[in-house]
Amino acid sequence: MNINKNLANFFSVPENKPANIEKSAGGTFDSNNFQKDYSLVQENFKQLIGTGNVALESALKVATESDSPRAYEVVAILLKTMADLNNNVLDVHKKAKDTTNSKVEIKQTNNSVFVGSTKDLQNILNKERSTEKEVIDAEVVKDEQKQ
């Protein structure tokens, strides 16, 4: 009997079926969890950016009304943070694209054999070094007008 089925019976819960797991270059990849996590991260970044925009407007209003150097410093730090958040959104997209496109097939050839002499192999590898020169066939035609 399967261990998952035994545990499900023991705890009186439905048996979990394994998720859609694919082998990739870095180990196992669960595409269902990846999509959930990607959506969660994307939504969190959007909420943070929205909250940051509201906070930036408030901090800018306080800075202009008070003319305090510290208030302007807070605005500058908040602007930098917002720019970093926007860059993080782009990084998440890039990483997601790289992760989903990581299914690369590697084709390897073992034991390739060249049939021929070492001289033939040298001629193929280095055309300039070749002892056999290319011969051009030509005919000599006499010009009858000069004679």
Image (tube, helix red, strand yellow):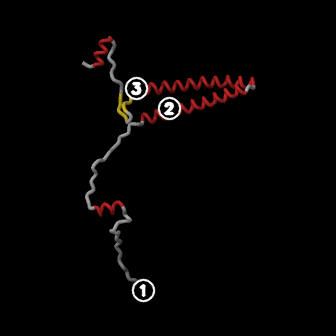
Q: Quadrant of residue 21?
A: top left
In front: 40, or 128? 128
Q: Position of residue 46 (x, y in %)?
A: 55, 26
Which mark is first along the chain, 3 or 1?
Answer: 3
Amino acid type, label 1: Gln
In front: 2, or 89? 2
Q: Residue furthest bottom?
A: 147
Which mark is first along the chain, 3 or 2?
Answer: 3
At 62% from the left and 25% from the top, the residue drawn is 53
Real-space CA distance between mark 2 and mark 1, rounded to the nearest whole angstrom: 82 Å
Is 96 placed left or right of 131 in the picture? right
Residue pointed to by mark 3: 32
**Callout 2: SS:** helix
At 59% from the left and 24% from the top, the residue drawn is 50
Q: Residues within 10 Å of mark 3 (few under 14, many from 20)?
A: few
Which mark is first along the chain, 1 or 2?
Answer: 2
Q: Is residue 30 above or below residue 130?
A: above
Q: Position of residue 75 (x, y in %)?
A: 67, 27
Residue pointed to by mark 1: 145
**Callout 3: SS:** helix
Q: Quadrant of residue 61?
A: top right
Amino acid type, label 3: Asn
Q: Mark 1–mark 3 contact, CB under 8 Å?
A: no
Q: Quadrant of residue 141?
A: bottom left
